[in-house]
Amino acid sequence: MTVPATMPVIRFSVLARVLHWLMAIMILGMLFIGVFMAATVGPAYNTLLSLHRPMGILILALALVRLGNRLLVPPPPLPDSLPALQRAAALGSHILLYALMIAMPLVGWGMLSAGGYPVVFCKGVHLPPILPHDPALFALLRHVHTWLGLTLFAVIVIHLGAALLHALILRDGVFPAMASARAGRRDPEPVQGDNRH
Amino acid sequence: MAEPPDRPATRVPFFTPGPRVLMRLALIGAVLAILCSAFAWTAGWLPPRRLTQTGMIDALRAVDGRHRGFRSNHAKGVCVTGWFEGNGQASRLSTASVLRAGRSPVVGRFALAGGMPFQADAPAKVRSMALRIMPPDGQEWRMGLNDIPVFVARTAQEFHDLLLATRPDPTTGKPDPARVGPFMATHPNTARAAAQVAKRSITSGFADDTYRSLDAFRFIDADGVVVPVRWAMVPLAPVQAPAARIEANTLFDGLIAALRQGPLQWRLMISIGTVSDPTSDPTVAWPADRDQVDAGTLTLNRAESEDNGPCTGITYDPTILPVGIAASDDPILPARSSAYMRSFVIRSGETKPPSAVSPASIGPGGQP
Ligand code: HEM
Ligand code: HEM
């Protein structure tokens, strides 16, 4: 069945949805791994770090694909019922999320480069340094990695809170736009309760 | 956002309060609270407090004080450079490229254990050699070796507790026997290891000393066969007895003077463990009759002060290993890796006063 292009876009593209949920799990996982390993001297340290590095680089690659997709395939519009402040907050937090998920791996990679560490992707595979060897820069970026990481966690918590607000209280179609398992960005017929125009 | 004028404004109310809504709000709050608590627990912000990297650095400082810009341990040191020449004999045990016949440049550091950057040299103080061996293919090998037969703790927690038990009493400046005694009584491994360290034979200086990995590692050959190993850098210089009394910088000055005379050399001797040898307990020495492989020769020909020297802007993390060499299950290794990074971060963000071994004490151009 072909869906007429005159029907409103109500969902993110399948690629956007897959990337969103995959990366949500990966990034939350990275944040938990990160704060745990940075506060342990135990046997898990090296194991977690050798998981953290490649997973971070993978997130960087996926984030670039996702950013391209986001710019090429416009997302569904927000419902008109949403006040201007919330719209601005949504847009702002989404820009921040993109910026952080690209910045975090770059800072991680950059700090190891500046610290003169080999940037090990996996056993035997080293990535080239992306910054010159500079210990003061290493110290600075190590702190930046912490503060951006904590900011990313805070933004994710707010984002999750807002998503649940849409899902459980506003019920305005914003949550299914990302959480639906249905194919395509449009439906063949208007869905009951959808208040988009 | 403004409505187009030709469309009637059909706004759905943004928010309709009521008991159901309140219930759901509470549910959302609970989800977020659980997520935040889990995060805080994972980060170690909630009790019970576990031993963190910062806790380890704090314990080192409790013993030796806080010295901005210096390493939190092995603080007094000097950079050295030279090369390692593999002879290929260990290549049957490990695919590491550094072990094949050929030369790899080395940036090293000699140091005295302890966090005091201006401590006076003394014959019995633990001396160390740290190496960064850089083969052309980028598979570098870093190591930090001490001139003692065994390490004094089995785990990070044990080392931490030992540091606190032996920290100097503020009134006497010496460890408090009332703390050390009970600690040794409840930690037989540490007591045994400390006795072995105390009765080791002491050489005249850095140049004729033997330095050991203490921790166990794994060599992996081309077929994936793994053998447990430990290693030592054994001096080619004849071993001499230490002087009875020495000056504050005698050991470092002696090293610099020796390098002025000519290069210093060590042989890398690999001990091959058997299944009965503990890899996870660096307080226990392996039997002396274990197979030994002479893997190559280290040649050092130049000393440089730490001040702007090539050994300052790196850390000798012993888990930076080439393909063909891997860490063992020794819990001291991850403890070192994580604590070295923390120490490196802290000191790299601080301005370091001039080191005890200054460029002036070495000579012009860094060339001894
Ligand atoms: C989305 C990507 C990433 C996230 C969300 C992330 C998150 C984190 C967090 C939260 C920490 C703990 C910070 C602290 O508590 O001080 C951390 C530490 C760290 N991360 Fe990342 N990271 C990412 C990517 C990377 C990459 C790509 C690398 C390296 C290639 C890297 C290397 C490190 C290192 C070396 C540490 C410090 C471990 C220590 O202090 O002992 N990270 N990361
Ligand atoms: C849990 C146990 C240990 C802790 C917490 C610890 C801690 C430290 C720290 C914080 C540094 C300074 C690192 C830097 O700022 O770059 C250091 C240096 C060093 N450690 Fe350890 N260490 C431990 C065990 C060992 C063992 C078992 C050995 C020897 C086999 C060793 C050998 C060295 C050497 C040689 C250095 C000096 C490296 C240099 O010259 O830069 N350490 N240690």
Image (spheres, coloured by chain):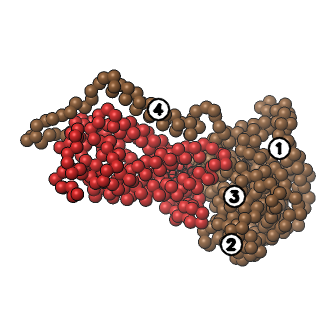
User: Do residues under tags 2 and 3 come within 8 Å of each other at their CB atoms?
Assistant: no
Label 3 crowd bin: few (<14), some (14–19), many (20+), radius 10 Å: many
Residue B190 disc label: 1
Mark 4, chain letter? B
Distance from disc 2 to disc 3, alpha carbons, whole Å, reads 17 Å
Q: Which callout, 2 or 3, points at the residue further toward the start of the chain?
A: 2
Comparing labels 4 and 3, the label whose residue is closer to the camera: 4
User: How far across and how far down the image is residue A77, in percent?
Assistant: 24, 46
Q: Label 2 lies in what chain?
A: B
- Who is closer to the viewer here, B21 or B72? B21
Front residue of A67 and B351:
A67
Dot 1, crowdedness within 10 Å: few (<14), some or many (≥20)? many
Residue A78 visible in the displayed image: yes
> In the image, A112: left or right of B196?
left
In the image, residue A32 above or below residue A125: above
Left or right, A50 with respect to B356, comes to left
Residue B327 got which mark? 3
Asked if labels 1 and 3 share a chain, the reply is yes
Residue visible at 57% across and 48% down?
B349
Establish whether labels 1 and 2 are both on one chain. Answer: yes
The chain letter corresponding to red is A
Q: Few, some or many C-alpha atoms within 10 Å of disc 4 (few <14, some 14-19, many ≥20)?
A: few
Query: What is the three-letter code of the residue carrying label 1?
Result: Thr
Which circle's residue, 4 or 3, is located before the other in the chain?
Answer: 4
Q: Residue B33 shows which numbered tag?
A: 4
Secondary structure beneath disc 4? Answer: helix
- Whether residue B229 is situated above or below residue A178 in the rendered picture: below
Find residue A186 and name its label. none
Indicate the position of residue B151 as horizontal and vertical percent values: 80, 50
Are the residues flagged by discs 1 and 3 in contact, CB closer than 8 Å?
no
Q: Is mark 3 within 8 Å of ligand 2?
A: no
